[in-house]
Image (cartoon, grey):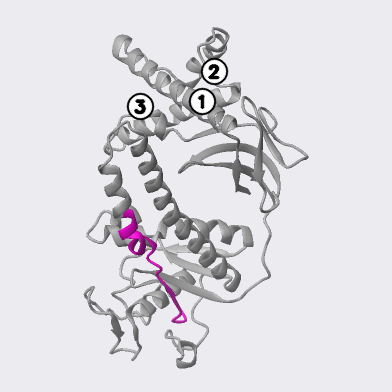
Amino acid sequence: MRKNFKYRLYPTAAQSGALDHQLAEACRLYNAAIQERRDAYRISHKSINYYDQANQLKEIRADGDLALANFSCCQDVLRRVDKTFNAFFDRVKNGQTPGYPRFRPVSRYDSITFPSYGDGCKLLDNGKLRLQGVGAVKVKLHRPIEGEIKTVTIKREAGKWYAVFSVECEAKPSPASTEATGIDVGLTAFATLADGTEIENPRYYKEAQAKLRRAQRKVARRKRGGNNRKKAVRELQRAHAHVRNQREDFAHKAARTLVVLFGLIVIENLNIKGLAAGMLAKSVNDAGWSSFIAKLTYKAAEAGRVLLKVPPHGTSQRCVCGAPNPKTLSQRWHHCESCGLSVPRDHASALEILRLGLSLLGETWPVAASVPNEAALL
């Protein structure tokens, strides 16, 4: 399986300037590739693909028109452009809002990728990372790299530099577990398990809103193009990066805990993008369900766990015994007249999600009735 290992880089002032220059050159190549495709179609109605543009690289570099040091990095930039246009054409075919590929400013082009480890990038014996066109950069290897390194991406985030190693490694199955659970994600509690356990919603963005508002106000009051505005933008970027890192850390730890405890995990196949565009958009985005589910998916695959996704329709409007139990969004307690189950709404949904997952496997509840026994609920 493929995994990413991210490490902090500590370049010198000269190396930082060289990295900025490499990103600027990659951005210039990216924009030139988009411009060439636009002009070719507008003038001669001809579509240009990746290979048409990649064949020009050797001549462009020989003429000194491109200062991006590594040839493979140049090819990767053109692959990004090709991927962008392919996604645009797919959206057109599917009847979605197309969103034509746009030019990128230098300030928003923040990464370059070395597609082949050893070609322009390599870890040295002294613990530094050698980058073509930059030199040996200090890297904080806070944990060992496991597996065979395939690609290396250099990223700039809020004024800090990082190296992301994409490696190919063997999965490490966890000890077998016969426990199973359903997970109902929510906003009051981040997630509720089938045994009634609730994972608290940390609401990192809500807590940081006052600080973010002040940082945004400072940016708005600075003159465009000035150094003070650049400093204010950097401060705002770091405030947002802190919230993002908090959310990522929480998602990693919550997903790891669930993977260790349960051998079967059942979740809803939610349309999170649609929910994030509704009236609860801020709270949904703050919860970070997509990031959590993505991490839970790959951690379960690595540990040899079974992760199932079930349709979300009706999981909160139906009892685990199968009887309809319609509720409005404001009704937070589930009481079934048919079987007598009386639990919080999210708990009942988690039980129904687990039942649906077991039905996909051809299994049923381990007790005689379709409703969990009282001891299990307690």
Mark 1, mark 3: which one is toward the viewer? Answer: 1
Q: Which residues are magenta?
A: 194-212
The residue carrying pointer 3 sits among few (fewer than 14), some (14 to 19) or many (20 or more) residues within 10 Å by Cα, namely some
Q: Position of residue 58 (x, y in %)?
A: 57, 12
SS under mark 3: loop
- Who's the residue at 50% across and 11% down the image? 65
Q: Pick whichever of labels 1 and 3 is earlier in the sequence.
A: 1
Q: Residue at x 44, y 32 (%)?
A: 109
Neighbor class of circle 2 (other Cα within 10 Å; few <14, some 14-19, many 20+) is some
Residue at mark 2: 67
Identify the mark nearer the N-term, 2 or 1.
1
Q: Residue at x 41, y 43 (%)?
A: 234
Query: In this image, 300 relative to 98: left or right?
Result: right
Whether pointer 2 and pointer 1 mark residues with C-beta atoms closer than 8 Å, the reply is yes
Q: How far apart are the alpha carbons under marks 3 and 2?
A: 19 Å
Distance from disc 1 to disc 3, alpha carbons, whole Å, reads 18 Å
208 in the magenta segment: yes
Instruction: Return the mark for residue 21.
Output: 1
Q: Nearer the viewer, residue 211 or 300?
A: 211
Residue 289, above or below 111: below
Q: Secondary structure at mark 2?
A: loop
Q: Is residue 3 magenta?
A: no
**Identity of the amino acid at label 2?**
Ala
Residue positioned 39% across, 63% down in the render: 204
Given the image, on which type of amino acid does mark 1 rest?
His
Viewer-nearest residue: 316 or 59: 59
Vertical relation: 246 (above or below) 72? below
Left or right of residue 181: residue 272: left
Identify the disc placed on residue 103. Answer: 3
State the image quarter where residue 103 is shown. top left
Left or right for 45, reference 124: left
